[in-house]
Amino acid sequence: MTIHHMSTTNESGNGSRMKYLQLADYIHTLIEKNDLHIGDRIPSLNQLQDQLGMSKETVLKGLNYLLEKGVIESVYRKGYYVKKKQVQHSYRILLLLDKMNTMREQIYQSLLAETKGAADIDVYFHHHNFNVFQNIITENIQNYTHFVIVTFLKEDPSPIINLIPPNKRIVIDYNQLGLSGTYTCIYQDYEYDIYNSLTLLQTNIQKYKKLLLIAHPEALHAQHVINGFVRYCEEFNMKYDILSEVDEQHFKKSTAFITFSRYDSDDVSLIKLTQKHGFALGRDIGLISYNDTDVKEILEGGITVISTDFRAMGKAAAESILQKKTMNQRNPTQVIIRKSL
């Protein structure tokens, strides 16, 4: 059977699917078009890798996804075979994320694990592009039982989200304003989280003379973080400043910095400045960063973090779907104290 090259990126503005899910879609299409029948051997790993232009890891993830769904089966030393045409699940979920990173992967994996055997999940990304966001929702409004959505857009997305019936709508990570009806929302309360977290860190913070928040103005949640930060500093009589970017002019000994940049670039800049001035992180300079990662656990002996539980977020979204209940709740956030403070 000849396999035609499959584009892994949607150029029409409809967003991009995870590549391994695109492979799964492709195999599904061959089955639905009767190009593959039950019992047929599907193309080999090498064939799929070469003809679809995907890496071996991506192809294996796509095949494993189909194996988990029961659509194909693996026969030792022979290959993969079509087991059944489709899987009938109770729910079809459109998971619309702003981007892919470790935190978003945790949401997806948690949602997938909690709904296993009960739902099909299609993952799309809008990359903070309003037109892409709009097209994904409007073109799929009839195709899914539930929409799990992350916003973070400069434009107001509420008119588009309101096209989705409230009982099918689950908004996560950010408490988007302007939405109608009774719907599920599992959100970070940025103002409460930073105030509460800094209060918990009060003993560690006391050894520094000043707190400096790096708040990028383009971040949608920046003002909420600033409000909580200022409230803490004024209540605890802490000298403070707020900058939009790391600035060596304000890099002084006995200062603790708080960062929440999208790509952790501010953390890297501050560590470089600490080394340049011969300071010690956790003694002369303090660093608190948002969102935990494996790298932050070991970088410079460990970076102190304020981190929401993204797995809990995915689990709560699944609970809302499977138990058919509406919830509006703040997602749990934890403080992990490490050497940097």
Image: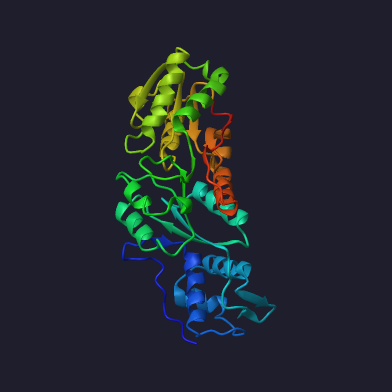
161 relative position to 197: left or right: left
Left or right relative to 201: residue 33: left
Q: Kindly identify the residue that appears in the image at 49 percent across and 60 percent down.
A: 145
Q: Is residue 31 above or below residue 319?
A: below
Along the viewing direction, whichever of 66 and 240 lies nearer the viewer: 66
User: Residue 149 placed where, x, y %?
Assistant: 44, 50
Front residue of 108/149: it is: 149
Q: Is residue 51 left or right of residue 292?
A: left
Comparing 27 with 314, the one in front is: 314
Relative height, residue 289 to residue 321 (above, below) = above
Q: Residue at 53% across / 36% down in the picture?
A: 307
Q: Is residue 139 above or below residue 293?
A: below
Q: Quadrant of the C terminus?
A: top right
| Above or below for 34 versus 101 | below
Give how far across and how far down residue 340 sits, in percent.
54, 28
The answer to whether residue 253 shows anywhere in this view is no
Question: Which residue ends up furthest to the right in the rendered image?
Answer: 76
Total labels: the figure holds 0
**How far across and how far down the image is residue 112, in percent?**
58, 56
Residue occupying the far top of the picture = 237
The residue shown at (54%, 42%) is 293
Residue 70 can be seen in this image: yes
Q: Is residue 87 left or right of residue 139?
A: right
Q: Position of residue 183 (x, y in %)?
A: 46, 46
**Colour scheme in the image?**
rainbow
Residue in the image at 32% along x and 66% along y: 11
Farthest residue to the bottom: give it: 1
Of 224 and 272, the residue lying toward us: 224
